[in-house]
Image: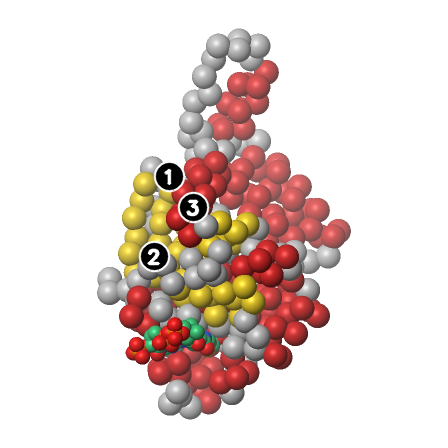
Amino acid sequence: MEFIQYEVNGAVGKITIAREKALNALNSTVLEELDATLDQVNLDEVRCLILTGAGEKSFVAGADIGEMSTLTKAEGEAFGKKGNDVFRKLEVFPIPVIAAINGFALGGGCEIAMSCDIRICSENAVFGQPEVGLGITPGFGGTQRLARLVGAGMAKQMIYTARNIKADEAFRIGLVNAVYPIEELMPAAEKMAASIAKNAPIAVRNCKKAINDGLEVDMDQAIVIEEKLFGDCFETEDQRYGMAFFLDKNKEKVKEPFKNK
Ligand code: CAA
């Protein structure tokens, strides 16, 4: 792969968008490689993913403006679909994805972060949807996910004004969960990923599905989704082990890793 690095450490996979010369901007190749990388993740082994950008300046500085500059209407729509398809794959990916946002997260960069389950960032991170300043709308889900995450009023303000916001403001409006000095960002992401990966994997996956699917429907349907996924857990070895471990009064016993079964 030219622009995507993928490494696995224990049960945690790390995907790095590595096109540093262009501040990790998303061209077609990056999107295709990201798509292929997600297809390669071994879900028997990996229980949580971290997504980050190469270097200490930029997470992702958006979709590639050079590539977009000559697109026709039909090509623009197809480029939007290409990004949306990959970002949706990330959003519904069976295991949790943590975005470790290490700098600029503009346009498509903010949008890919919003497709992840959890966002944490470095103090130098900058967020924004600058598209209207380029004569386009956000095209990789920004009009939809930003409004869902921070509310329609704040999303509209950010998108209409194209004003960038810094990490502290992103934290204040709920766009990120936490802000760290840059050198502490990856250790924090790894620690969070490890604390997710140690839990019963099928239960974690079912939680992701319940939250994602439940947010798409009304509460009466949402709780039925939860009931089904809750019930499914009772067919797993991990549920039997997790509850038996709790009920065992032998305090000397050490908890074994969950089996993903
Ligand atoms: N596309 C293509 N190339 C990009 C890029 C992008 N989105 N962002 C940065 N680059 C390139 C620059 O052209 C430059 O390349 P050269 O060295 O070959 O000139 C290199 O990365 C370094 O960038 P700068 O010299 O501009 O660095 P800077 O520190 O002065 O500024 C920045 C950093 C403020 C992030 C600035 O690069 C910038 O504003 N980038 C564009 C951000 C943007 O508008 N993103 C939204 C794109 S539209 C979109 O994403 C649509 C969508 O929803 C699908």
The amino acid beneath tag 3 is: Glu
Residue 3 in percent (x, y) is at: 28, 64
- The image position of residue 187, as x and y in percent, is 41, 43
Mark sitting on residue 16: 2
Residue 63's x, y, as percent? 42, 74
Residue 226 appears left or right of 20: right
Of labels 2 and 1, the one closer to you: 2
Residue closer to the observer: 243 or 51: 51
Disc 3 versus disc 2: distance between alpha carbons?
17 Å
Residue on which the image places disc 1: 11
Gap in angstroms between the C-alphas marked 3 and 1: 21 Å
Relative vertical location of residue 50 with respect to residue 138 in this rendering, above or below = above
Instruction: Give the SS element for disc 1.
Output: loop
Nearer to me, 116 or 35: 116
Q: Is residue 261 above or below residue 172?
A: above
Q: Is residue 172 above or below residue 165?
A: above
Q: Amino acid under label 2?
A: Thr
Whether residue 84 is visible here, answered yes or no, is no
- Real-space Cα separation, disc 2 to disc 1, in angstroms: 17 Å
Q: Mark 3 or mark 1, which has the lower sequence index?
A: 1
